[in-house]
Amino acid sequence: MLRLACAVFAAAVVLTACSSGVDTTRSVSARTTVAAPTSGADAGPVDPALTEAKLRAVDPCGLLDARLLGDIGTPSGQPSGDAFQGCHAGVTVNGQQVTVSVTLGDAVPELDHDALALAGLRVLAAKQDASCTEKAVTQDAPSRAVVVRVDAKGGDPCGIGKQALTAVIARIRTAPPQLPAGGSVMAAVDPCTLVDQATVAALVGPQARLDSESLHDCAWRQNGITLEIYAKIAGNPAVPGFDKPPTPVDLGGVTAYQSDSSTSYPSCTVQWADRPISGSQGEVVTVYVGNGQKTPGVDTCGRAVAAGKIVTTKLPKS
């Protein structure tokens, strides 16, 4: 991993000073502001190294190695996390214990689209209590960002966050650590490609709106009907939780587990482990269908199972 050179810091634009509470204003003195793209502007990736496909292949824990953290302070312990929910690591800075977290490809709220410049990207900074979150926007449609969050009970979490984000971006651009081959089925997969438009039209509606909050989830919504597909590290879906035991269902040779709910509005979840469960945790694929407007005649579990059967045919074999 490349060490952070002084020249990089000199070029980096200083972000707003962090104060207690949520920082809802952004001072622009002595810094460069970057406006959000206007309609019709190129909304794709701003850098070939930061495309969705490239970010899916990066190991977030590999980014937080001893060399990168050593430029910030004294690393403590090993990074912990996964490709789906990001990674966090401890580091001591000026005697203060700090946690640095990184996630790749998170969505950016519309209200945050005006930003400051850092490492050639639009960066959003927000402080709340003892934490500071820095989001480097990598594309606008769908919105994506490399996100660094710093939690510290003292010191300058936003300053540390800026330093860490600059280093993370530099590493992704030059020598990104890759997820191990064969270590995941879903990490490198775009979930929005797992069902075709005809299926979406049949299960959700012909005018369904696509919505994606991260690199590893995708949802389609129309008139209160939602179809969502995502993956994460979770408990064994075959093991009953606090609700009634899940029902085994056959997805064309793949055994999944169905759970339905009508406590607030009708919904159904179909889950399966796409790799063998190790201990109590594993890589779990979830297909969810919700009926938010309680539309009569909508079989949420029937639709979830139908979508699940298609998803299993599109996934790489583990």
Image (cartoon, rainbow, N blue to C red):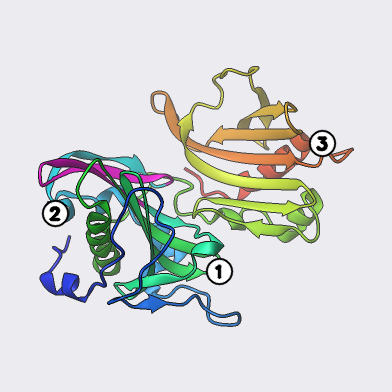
Image coords of residue 210 (percent x, y): 66, 59
Is residue 90 in view? yes
Which label's residue is closer to the chain start, 3 or 1?
1
Quote the CA–CA distance across marks 3 and 2.
53 Å
Which span of residues is magenta-colored? Answer: 84-102
Which residue occupies 50% across, 50% down? 216
Residue denoted by label 1:
141
Write down the quadrant of residue 40 in the picture.
bottom right
In-image side of 14 versus 286 (left or right): left
- The kind of secondary structure element at disc 2 is helix
Which label's residue is closer to the chain start, 1 or 2?
2
Write down the quadrant of residue 169 in the picture.
bottom left
Which residue occupies 51% across, 49% down? 316
Q: Residues within 10 Å of mark 2 (few under 14, many from 20)?
A: some
Q: Amino acid at mark 2?
A: Arg
Quote the CA–CA distance across marks 1 and 2.
33 Å
In-image side of 216 versus 47 (left or right): right
- The kind of secondary structure element at disc 1 is loop
Q: Residues within 10 Å of mark 3 (few under 14, many from 20)?
A: some
- The kind of secondary structure element at disc 3 is loop
Q: Main secondary structure of the magenta part?
A: strand
Residue denoted by label 3:
299
Quote the CA–CA distance across marks 3 and 1.
32 Å
Indicate which label's residue lies in the foreground, 3 or 2.
2
Image coords of residue 281 (percent x, y): 42, 29
Indicate which label's residue lies in the foreground, 3 or 1.
1
Q: Amino acid at mark 3?
A: Asp
